[in-house]
Image (cartoon, rainbow, N blue to C red):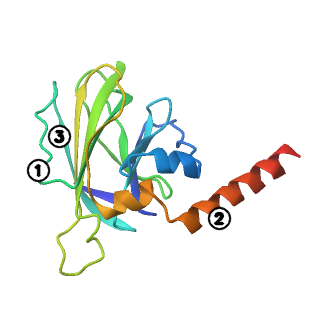
């Protein structure tokens, strides 16, 4: 399915979910592919593509699929909380969102395990490079900690390890904002 992307990301969200608030330290501690809010109702998936439509395959199952990282650059598992109706996926800014139906009753909320795969994020701008692709597998499962199966692309590396000057500028801006809010 073609999923709308903006600002190098697409999201999965419940209708009333709020985006996770992240400091630069949270970003550095993250996996570089996906971040999720504390409630498990909103996830941001980082892309190499800055804007437009991106090919994302959703594979919803009733149990955990076999792990396959061979042809993927990044693979991460997280837990999210949705009804069988499922999340909306896409770009929340212009409200360009698509339904991703899960299995089960629309009224019954439960925890789901999501396995995010990405490849081609580093070559998204190269006209002769392979296209960026994402696979999102989901199955019902109890809430569990994040699992980082594979983290090898430069897009994720830059997110996990921002350049020191950028980090210092961002930390200073965060401190200034905290001082302003505290007055």
Query: Quick check: marks 2 and 1 in contact, CB under 8 Å?
Result: no
Residue 47 seen by the camera: no
- Which comes before the other along the chain, label 2 or label 3? 3
Q: CA distance from mark 1 to mark 3?
A: 17 Å
Q: Please state the horizontal and vertical placement of residue 164, each as a whole percent of the image.
A: 54, 64
The correct choice, above or below, for 170 with respect to 103 in the image is: below
Task: From the viewer's perspective, tell me whether residue 163 is left or right of residue 83.
Answer: right
> Alpha-carbon neighbours of circle 1 within 10 Å: few (<14), some, or many (≥20)?
few
Q: Please state the horizontal and vertical placement of residue 138, each as a whole percent of the image.
A: 23, 34
Q: CA distance from mark 2 to mark 3?
A: 40 Å
Q: Please state the horizontal and vertical placement of residue 172, each as a whole percent of the image.
A: 70, 59
Residue labelled with disc 2: 169
The correct choice, above or below, for 137 with respect to 164 in the image is: above
Dot in front, 1 or 3: 1
Task: Name the residue located 77 percent from the left edge and 56 percent from the top edge.
Answer: 176
Q: Nearer the viewer, residue 63 or 13?
A: 63
Q: Secondary structure at mark 2?
A: helix
Task: From the viewer's perspective, tell me whether residue 88 is left or right of residue 116.
Answer: right
Task: Name the residue located 69 percent from the left edge and 54 percent from the top edge.
Answer: 174
- Which comes before the other along the chain, label 1 or label 3? 3
Residue labelled with disc 3: 59
> Alpha-carbon neighbours of circle 2 within 10 Å: few (<14), some, or many (≥20)?
few
Q: Secondary structure at mark 3?
A: strand
> Alpha-carbon neighbours of circle 3 within 10 Å: few (<14), some, or many (≥20)?
some
Dot in front, 2 or 3: 2
Task: From the viewer's perspective, tell me whether residue 134 is left or right of residue 7.
Answer: left
Please state, as top left, top right, bottom left or bottom right, where the N terminus lies in the image.
bottom left
Q: CA distance from mark 2 to mark 1?
A: 37 Å
Residue labelled with disc 1: 70
């Amino acid at each position: 399915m073609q999923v709308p992307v903006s600002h190098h990301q697409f999201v999965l969200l419940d209708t009333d979910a709020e985006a996770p608030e992240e400091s630069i330290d949270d970003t550095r501690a993250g996996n570089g592919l996906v971040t999720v809010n504390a409630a498990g109702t909103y996830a941001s998936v980082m892309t190499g593509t800055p804007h437009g439509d991106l090919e994302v395959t959703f594979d919803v199952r009733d149990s955990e699929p076999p792990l396959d990282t061979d042809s993927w650059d990044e693979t991460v598992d997280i837990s999210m909380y949705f009804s069988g109706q499922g999340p909306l996926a896409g770009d929340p800014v212009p409200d360009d969102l698509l339904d991703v139906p899960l299995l089960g009753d629309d009224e019954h909320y439960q925890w789901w395990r999501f396995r995010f795969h990405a490849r081609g994020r580093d070559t998204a701008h190269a006209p002769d490079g392979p296209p960026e692709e994402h696979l999102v597998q989901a199955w019902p499962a109890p809430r569990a900690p994040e699992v980082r199966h594979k983290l090898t692309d430069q897009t994720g590396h830059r997110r996990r390890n921002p350049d020191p000057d950028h980090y210092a500028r961002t930390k200073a801006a965060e401190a200034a904002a905290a001082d302003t809010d505290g007055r």
